[in-house]
Structure formats: structure tokens, C-alpha cells
């Protein structure tokens, strides 16, 4: 009798464990909806930052109710503004601010201006200069250039890279531009 009771209780326990594991494996629809809302609001808040410009690149990752901020900015105030804006979004529990503030450098400032003119002033790329938010981000750190953002075609991506490489005084160019999917 005790052996049978032990076997029944072991079976019930294993069924309960399997049910709990199955429930944990299925994504909670409310949690997924909240995460989607948080992602949308974080994107909006980062786009609305007053000091963010073409020489800054901000990115983020949402994991549940935690937000990680990445990227590079020219001014320290942009880093703190980004964290403060995201911190106040409803549902965000924690913000990990990994945004790097680029070191001040007269050489880098000169290169930024020259790169802006070389890319956005070129007739085939002038269409990207329209509007407030420029889609090609120009990151300069110690003479090394990274292009981030989204362009319409592979030709525009390559042209922006060629224009950046043509600026004197640059050590390297990493072209991370993505081509927009139609």
C-alpha cells in the first residue's frame, strides 16, 4: 500500500513539474505586449533627444523590463539625457547605460565637419540631408570613422563609404550602413 501511494505521489509530482515547466516555456502574451510597447517608447524617446545629432549613434536592447543603451555620443549630456528619458518610461525597471562618450579632439571635430560636407553635400547623397533626423550617422573616434544608419540602396552605401575614405586625415572607415529592405 505504501509503495503504491509512493508511486502515485511521484507520478502526480512529475506531472505538476511538467505542467509548470510547460507554462514557463510559453511566452506570456501580456509580457510580450509590454515589451513591444517599451521598445516603441524607448525608440521614440531616443529620437526626441534635443542634443542628439548626426555625429551620435544611439542603439538599445529591451530584455523584458530592462533596457540596455549602446552607442557613441559627442556630448556627455546626450548620454545622461538618454538614460533619464528611458528611465521614466512606464514598465522599465532597470537601465544599463553603456553609451560611450567620445573623447574631445580638435582633429575629430575637423574630420566630422569635413565628413558631413563630403557625404551630405555630394549631389547623389543630398537626399539624405533633407529633414531633421539624418539617416547616415558619422562617428569619429581618434581619426577612425564608422558610418551607421540606413540608406536606400547598396550603391548609396558604397558611395558614402567612398566619400568618407576621400577625406584627408582619416585613418580608417568602417561602413556599417544597412540597406533598407523594400
Image (tube, grey):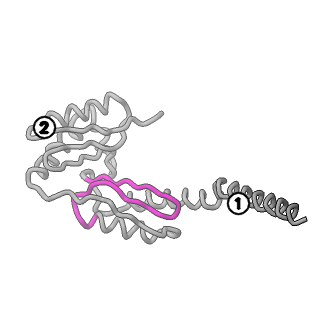
- The residue depicted at 36 percent of the width and 67 percent of the height is 83
Query: Magenta stretch containing residue 89, yes or no?
Result: no
**Image disc number at residue 20:** 1
The N terminus is located in which quarter? bottom right
Q: Is residue 53 left or right of residue 171?
A: right
Q: Nearer the viewer, mark 2 or mark 1?
A: 1
Check the image and name the residue furthest to the top.
155
Q: Is residue 8 left or right of residue 142?
A: right
- The residue depicted at 31 percent of the width and 33 percent of the height is 157
Find residue 51 and report its image quarter.
bottom left
User: Are the residues tagged 2 and 1 within 8 Å (C-beta)?
Assistant: no
Q: Is residue 59 above or below residue 90?
A: above
Q: Earlier in the sequence, mark 2 or mark 1?
A: 1
- State the residue in front, 177 or 15: 15
**Image disc number at residue 38:** none
* Label 2 sits on residue: 167
Find residue 6 and report its image quarter.
bottom right
Callout 2 crowding tier (Cα within 10 Å): few <14, some 14–19, many ≥20:
some
Q: Position of residue 178 (x, y in %)?
A: 37, 38
Check the image and name the residue furthest to the right.
1
- State the residue in front, 18 or 51: 18
Query: Magenta stretch containing residue 71, yes or no?
Result: yes
Q: Secondary structure at mark 1?
A: helix
Measure how far apart labels 2 and 1 are at the Cα level.
60 Å
- The residue depicted at 38 percent of the width and 57 percent of the height is 47
The total of numbered circles placed on residues is: 2
Q: Secondary structure at mark 2?
A: loop
Main SS of residues in magenta = strand
- State the residue in front, 23 or 47: 23
- The residue depicted at 26 percent of the width and 67 percent of the height is 77
Q: Is residue 140 above or below residue 181?
A: below
In the rendered structure, which segment of residues is drawn in magenta? Answer: 56-78
Amino acid at each position: 500500500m505504501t509503495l503504491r501511494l509512493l508511486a502515485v505521489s511521484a507520478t502526480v509530482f512529475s506531472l505538476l513539474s511538467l505542467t509548470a515547466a510547460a507554462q514557463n516555456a510559453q511566452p506570456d502574451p501580456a509580457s510580450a505586449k509590454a515589451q513591444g510597447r517599451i521598445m516603441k517608447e524607448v525608440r521614440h524617446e531616443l529620437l526626441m533627444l534635443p542634443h542628439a545629432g548626426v555625429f551620435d549613434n544611439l542603439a538599445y536592447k529591451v530584455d523584458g523590463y530592462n533596457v540596455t543603451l549602446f552607442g557613441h555620443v559627442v556630448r556627455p549630456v546626450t548620454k545622461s539625457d538618454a538614460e533619464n528619458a528611458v528611465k521614466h518610461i512606464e514598465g522599465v525597471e532597470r537601465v544599463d547605460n553603456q553609451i560611450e562618450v567620445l573623447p574631445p579632439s580638435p582633429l575629430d571635430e575637423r574630420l566630422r565637419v569635413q565628413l558631413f560636407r563630403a557625404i551630405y553635400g555630394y549631389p547623389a547623397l543630398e537626399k539624405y540631408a533633407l529633414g531633421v533626423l539624418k539617416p547616415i550617422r558619422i562617428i569619429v573616434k581618434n581619426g577612425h570613422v564608422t558610418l551607421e544608419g540606413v540608406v536606400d540602396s547598396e550603391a548609396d552605401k558604397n558611395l558614402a563609404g567612398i566619400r568618407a575614405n576621400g577625406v584627408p586625415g582619416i585613418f580608417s572607415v568602417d561602413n556599417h550602413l544597412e540597406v533598407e529592405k523594400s
